[in-house]
Image (tube, helix red, strand yellow):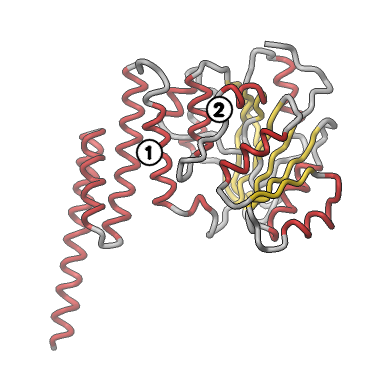
Amino acid sequence: MSMVADSSLVSIIIPTHNDRQWVSGSIDSALAQSYPHCEVIVVDDGSTDGTQDYLSDRYGDRIKFIYKSNSGPASARNIGVAAASGSFIQFLDSDDFIPSNKIARQMEVFSENPKCDVVYCDFAYTTEGPEGIVEESPAAHKKKHGAENVFEALLDGNFIVIHSPLTRASVIRDCGGFDEGLPSDEDYDLWLRIAANGYRFCFIPEVLALYRKRHNSVSRNFLRQSNGTISALNKASKYRTTLTDSETGNLKRTLSREYGWIALTYIGQLDYGQGLKAVWSSLLNNPGHGLNVATKATKQIVRQILNRHLFWRIGRK
């Protein structure tokens, strides 16, 4: 792997769709980087809220702006990668932030460890902006930070948010970029693919990515996200000819967990057909966890039936 020059260009790619009220915060954090060699690429995924005119007036030629018809964030990121001139890629969603020293700190790690292909960091949740951290990243994420076998750790669930890593552009391109056919979790799928191909991940134990909590963000669409996770995991099972026992265990346990959440969500919506189908999938992947899901699902269904019967009796009086 080649050494990192002090003047290596970093491309910061920001996809956006009807996020005019938020995107300027993300762009401002990208433009405020202390590392001097950055380009900021904003890919507008078919916005209809005046984003293009707003950004043109506010930023002019300080950003590279690309407009495309709406087809999702994976497509927008891929177009950004294709347009990028940098040797390193930083992804940043249009409602998130990166502290001003993020790129500089991660480029230092690349310089000190030239065999690294991906340098990722810790993150924190925020609601109000760069100064409004409200909670740390989950403990389940923290215990996997710095894992020696990143592929195995990822099979136990994603712990690398989209704007945590700084990645060599060649690695992203060699691994095919984002899968535009996934309903969600296209970033999870990319990290799995990079790790499965043997590229080296290096961790920096600092909070250098801020993830905004929004009630209407894509990450709040629970069923869609879980189905995306399952799709990414099913793809990952084929990225290597064989998986170790530990990798297989992590894969099946995570699939069982995701199917369990889907099952209880569907049952909560009184969709027993889809709910019981997901219970069965949870049982098949990990019988121990699946049995717990089946027990919870049974109790939930019984409560719903009893409540409906109670309401029916009250209505008859």
Circle 2 SS class = loop
Tell me which residue sits at (56%, 48%) in the image.
72
Tell me which residue sits at (23%, 45%) in the image.
279
Circle 1 SS class = helix
Residue 77's spot in the image, x, y percent? 62, 40
Callout 1 amino acid: Ile
Q: Which mark is residue 230?
A: 1
Answer above or below: position of 262 versus 281.
below
Number of residues whose C-alpha sits closer than 10 Å to that of mark 1, classed few (under 14), some (14–19) or many (20 or more): many
- Asked if residue 251 can be seen in this view, the reply is yes
Residue 255's spot in the image, x, y percent? 33, 36
Answer above or below: position of 51 versus 108.
below
* Quadrant assignment for the N terminus: top right
Residue 238's spot in the image, x, y percent? 38, 24
Which residue is labeled 2 in the image? 176
Tell me which residue sits at (49%, 22%) in the image.
150
Q: How far is mark 1 from mark 2, CA to CA?
A: 20 Å
